[in-house]
Amino acid sequence: MKIAILGTGGVGKAFATRLTDLGHEVCVGTRDVSKTLEKDGEAGFKHFQSLNPKVKLATFSDAAAFGEIVINVSKGANTMDVIKAASSNLKGKVLVDISNPLDFSNGMPPSLIPEYSNTNSLGEEIQKYLPDTKVVKTLNTMWNGLMINPALIGNGDHVNYICGNDTEAKKKVISLLNEFGWKKESLLDLGDINAARATEAVLPIWLRVYGAKQSGAFNFKIVS
Amino acid sequence: MKIAILGTGGVGKAFATRLTDLGHEVCVGTRDVSKTLEKDGEAGFKHFQSLNPKVKLATFSDAAAFGEIVINVSKGANTMDVIKAASSNLKGKVLVDISNPLDFSNGMPPSLIPEYSNTNSLGEEIQKYLPDTKVVKTLNTMWNGLMINPALIGNGDHVNYICGNDTEAKKKVISLLNEFGWKKESLLDLGDINAARATEAVLPIWLRVYGAKQSGAFNFKIVS
């Protein structure tokens, strides 16, 4: 499948590599292609492309046009700007949103950006801004290594929430999650996109557990 | 040990019964003793006391005076009023706070009370109001049946967070948690009381999972 990834950071690169390995065609979107390619060194995108030559790089808008499914991995504070830049080519598409509205202005660990939390969320804000796009929120409650390879810990038996207004879109995303290694019994459908306010609110406890364990290689499992 | 419970609702009654069964002397605190005893029927406190004659009932202030450890189980929206009513007898004491700042004014499921969430919490607010009391936040991230009997599900292997500024106070509370059945490896110390803003923020996802499962008999386990 043709998949677009909005965001060139570590999470975007990890998704690009994993999706390419799974046989998908991947285009990563960025604000300014030439600027993204300017950065030298191992953290730069030029170096990444030299190791992953099949991965395309384009503007947010062109990447969105390329993807049958579009995955937003941008930092929460930038997400709405990224979505606006890509919006003209997101109509009718499935948009997987894994962003979190983290606010670093109050020190560490970060809190949540007030306007996108408690009675709102980034997932909902994106859906409101793009009424003709099928926003599916998932994977945002864990370390990115686990998002694309859940079997790294506990035989993959830990929870990944999914929510969104469109049932068919959720089915498509679940199919992709299965390719990553997510088992059916580890996925919990929480209903409409407004459940994103709950999954994004997992971050405060995630960050404290991360602080206590000094490792991101953990996730929550629901015991009953 | 002499233990006070602030709150006469279902959670307070469950704690009173369990603590009495464990051999503790229990006094439940309420705003108005005669009013609390007025209510007839099976949900009333008079009926409860007829089944649990060892459990005392007193004002919030008198109950606080009685308890070596005081447990706040009042509804989050009322907690600061309850704490103020008991405050003159809370100096130097260990106060276990299991309340959550739930806001029902935006419909169901509830959101969090803005002034006590994200960059603040009820746990922190109580500690600020009572600088000479040792506030320990714990047990607030699950159904009350599990708080006092974790072995009800999953062999008791699921997480209970604890936080507070005073190490000795946390040790005393851990000892009580052990009596309830909490194993050492299920308790995760998140540090100072400001971690209460993270554990109280578990409620949004807890409420959504509760909605999906239609049962409160579940808890989260940390898999790594």
Image: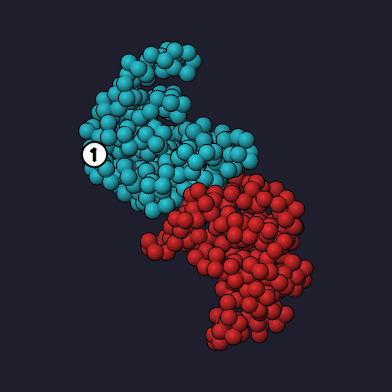
Chain colours: A cyan, B red
Q: Residues within 10 Å of mark 1 (few under 14, many from 20)?
A: few
Q: Is residue A50 visible?
A: yes
Image: B191 above or below A55: below
Image: A56 above or below B9: above
Identify the subunit bearing mark 1. Answer: A
Camera-nearest residue between A35 and B91: B91
Expressed as whole percent of the image width and height from the top left, the position of residue A92 reads 23, 39
Q: Determine which quarter of the picture holds residue B212.
A: bottom left
Camera-nearest residue between B194 and A168: B194
Expressed as whole percent of the image width and height from the top left, the position of residue B154 reads 63, 54
Give the left or right position of residue B44, taking residue A176 as reference.
right
Residue at the image position 67 percent from the left and 50 percent from the top:
B165
Camera-nearest residue between B73 and B17: B73
Marks counted in the figure total 1
Expressed as whole percent of the image width and height from the top left, the position of residue A188 reads 45, 49
Q: Which residue is mark 1?
A: A92
Expressed as whole percent of the image width and height from the top left, the position of residue A38 reads 38, 13
Image: A87 above or below A41: below
Camera-nearest residue between A146 and A142: A142
Tell me the SS state at disc 1.
loop
Residue at the image position 54 percent from the left and 38 percent from the top:
A108
Quadrant of the image containing the N terminus of chain A: top left
Give the left or right position of residue A193, taking residue A149 as reference.
left
Give the left or right position of residue B163, taking residue B203 as reference.
right
Residue at the image position 68 percent from the left and 59 percent from the top:
B133
Residue at the image position 46 percent from the left and 26 percent from the top:
A10
Q: Label 1 amino acid?
A: Gly
Quadrant of the image containing the C terminus of chain A: bottom right
Q: Is residue B217 visible?
A: no
Q: Determine which quarter of the picture holds residue B51.
A: bottom right
